[in-house]
Image: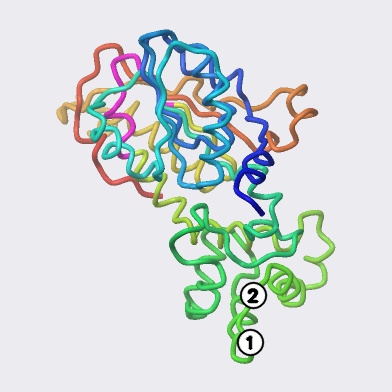
Amino acid sequence: MREETRSLQFSHVPVLLTECLKALDLKANGTYVDCTAGGAGHSAAILQRLGSGGRLFAFDKDPTARQAAAAKLAQVKTAATYELIAADFASLREELSKRNVFAVDGILADLGVSSPQLDTGERGFAYRLEGPLDMRMNPTCGRTAADILRLEDQATLTRIMREYGEERYAARIAAAVVKTRETKPLTGTGELVDLICKAVPAAARREKQHPAKRVFQSLRIAVNDELGALRKLLQQAPGLLKPDGHLVIITFHSLEDRLVKQAFRRWERPCRCPSGLPCVCGLASQGKADPPHGLVAGKTELAENPRSRSARVRVFRRNANPTLVEIFSGEVSD
């Protein structure tokens, strides 16, 4: 398929757009980052609201997504400036520093897989479509899902499926993969779906959720090191926010939501002193999660955009007069 045709097909409805724009509290002359440009739904809406002093930096490692984003942003009538950056948001600080940007007013990250990626069989993300077992967000580099299924041992495959997909039958599926590849490696999505359906109990095949959903999620997360990238974002983003800046993250499953929620809690209540005793550690709150439990889609959006059903927006607002402490550069763990 020609690249220009692909970009035209990369149309994507951004989830919780109104909520995200409100949470960012956009300033006309502010500097903003969209960590996941995708089809530029969120990016275009941000850019439309910026004035002559405003700047937008939109990241995406998927070349097809960047091409679609470039076409959409070029149509936005604005006096602001913008740049599309071909990089993973894990390198947020490094890429911004190359551009002499060391503090921003707001950061947005939509952690979901875009509809065009899911709906294109040749990308390998969808268990309902035939295609190669690829699953790379950046199809020009890195290991594919087929590589992982071919090279990793049974214990590692079991761990990937159990940890990243919360798959109950991870051990059975991993054993089936290892046995099958002795004769022929798995290379197609349909092959993997058939293997999973045969490996799980009959009762699991009758459940409402497709039996391959969790395994495909786990492989996608492993291929793209999604949780590793998120941890790096959470290590960098708060320290890049200006006073009263906002970090807005859209999560879609419990693994990433837990990481974000726990990080926000640490930044809001960093004190390490024993409960009930005076604080002597000197770690002051750097802001607050607002609202505490995040935001979810309303009835209208749920009806118009089914993808929003599993989405949750979490917002962290930096203090107006923050004190930088080591919690912003510390290790982020599960």
The disc labelled 2 sits on which kind of residue?
Ile
Q: Position of residue 108 (x, y in %)?
A: 46, 29
Residue 152 placement (x, y as % from top left): 47, 77
**Residue at which label 2 appears:** 173
Left or right: residue 331 compared with residue 132? left
When the figure is inspected, residue 113 is found, relative to residue 300, above or below; the finding is below
Spot the residue most to the bottom. Answer: 183
Q: Eyeballing the image, is 178 above or below 287?
A: below
Q: Residue at x 43, y 8 (%)?
A: 51
Residue 136 vertical position relative to residue 181 in the rendered view, above or below:
above
Q: Nearer the viewer, mark 1 or mark 2?
A: 1
Residue type indicated by callout 1: Lys
User: Which of the labelled discs sits on residue 137, or is there none?
Assistant: none
Q: Which mark is residue 184?
A: 1
Instruction: Give the residue at x 51% y 73%.
Output: 147
Q: On the image, which quarter does residue 307 sit in? A: top right
Point out the residue furthest to the right here: 206
Residue situated in front as seen by the camera: 261 or 226: 226
Percent x, y of residue 42: 55, 26
Occupied quadrant, residue 86: top left
